Image (cartoon, grey):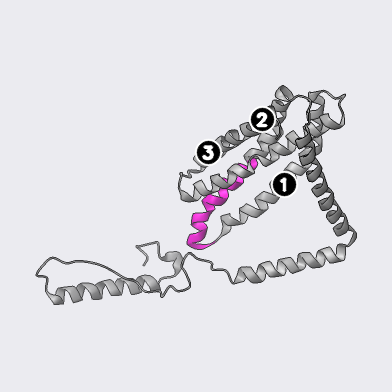
Amino acid sequence: MQNFRLTLITVTAIPVSLIGTFAVMSGLGIQINIISMFGLVMAIGIVVDAAIIVIENAEHQLHEHPEMTVKEAVSKALDITFSPIIASMLVLLAVFTPSLFIPGMAGTIYSEFGIVLCASVVVSTLVALTLTPALCALFMKPPKKNIIAKSVEWVITQKIRAFTGLAWTATRLPILTIALLAGGLYLSVERGASLPTGLLPEEDTSAIFVVGSFPQGTALSKTDEYLASLTEQLNAYLACPPALRLQASTC
């Protein structure tokens, strides 16, 4: 961020967003486990993006318009970045929300992952639109750039111009853009159909191994009788429809 004050504002958005995510998790009864922790680790890098957009744009306004006060720069930056921040939130939700609808055991597990990420995205967006502008108005000062900062910004500016040129070309050639999008969707569907839908590897042989022990001196006839009964129960369980297997009274 090239400035201690701006870094402090940025870092503040992380714990506030995570605390809000914890509140959502608590309300939905989600516990801390490997899956939810994985979602929180990913969320740490996501929750700060929207805040950085607001901060950088406010600093840009102060740099381009030195006559502006900090509050005016923050207000204008918020007007400019409001729509892009909302759009980025919707895009992230479109990416993570489908994990809530994965069927089977994998869906049950990864639904918590999706809920954590979706909650963190929404909370971080609210933080970027409320807390971050307030902190900027309190702590931000007009920027003073050194040679290193100016060099870094020049490189970033060139990258922005390249992406802007690419976007301009895409809008001027809509047929080519639509064709590329259709090709990408086709490849996604084709490749996605070959991905495993469960947690079991392809080399699984669908065999069931049971390890048990009997008291010393148990007759072989008793062991065979118990194994036959257990085999009958397993076959009856596997014969049940998947939706009824968890209902012991039905199967």
Residue that badge 1 annotates = 88
Residue type marked 2:
Ile
Q: Which residue in the rendered view is the most extreme toward the right? A: 172
Q: CA distance from mark 2 to mark 1?
A: 21 Å
Is residue 126 something that shows in the picture? yes
Nearer the camera: disc 2 or disc 1 = 2
Look at 49% across and 55% down and name the residue there. Answer: 109
Mark with earlier residue (3, 2): 2
* Mark 3 vs 1: CB contact within 8 A: no
Mark with earlier residue (3, 1): 3
Q: Kindly identify which numbered label has been placed on residue 114.
A: none
Please state, as top left, top right, bottom left or bottom right, where the C terminus lies in the image. bottom left
Q: Secondary structure at mark 3?
A: helix
User: Dot 3, crowdedness within 10 Å: few (<14), some or many (≥20)?
Assistant: some
Residue that badge 2 annotates = 9
Q: What's the magenta region?
A: 103-122
Residue type marked 1:
Ser
Q: Secondary structure at mark 2?
A: helix
Q: Looking at this view, is 49 or 242 the one in front?
A: 49
Residue type marked 3:
Phe
Does the stretch in magenta take in 113? Answer: yes
Residue that badge 3 annotates = 22
Q: Is residue 119 left or right of residue 135?
A: left
Look at 52% across and 42% down and name the residue there. Answer: 25
Q: Point out residue 211 in the picture as x, y percentages from the top left corner.
A: 26, 67
Compared with 171, 245 (above or below) is below
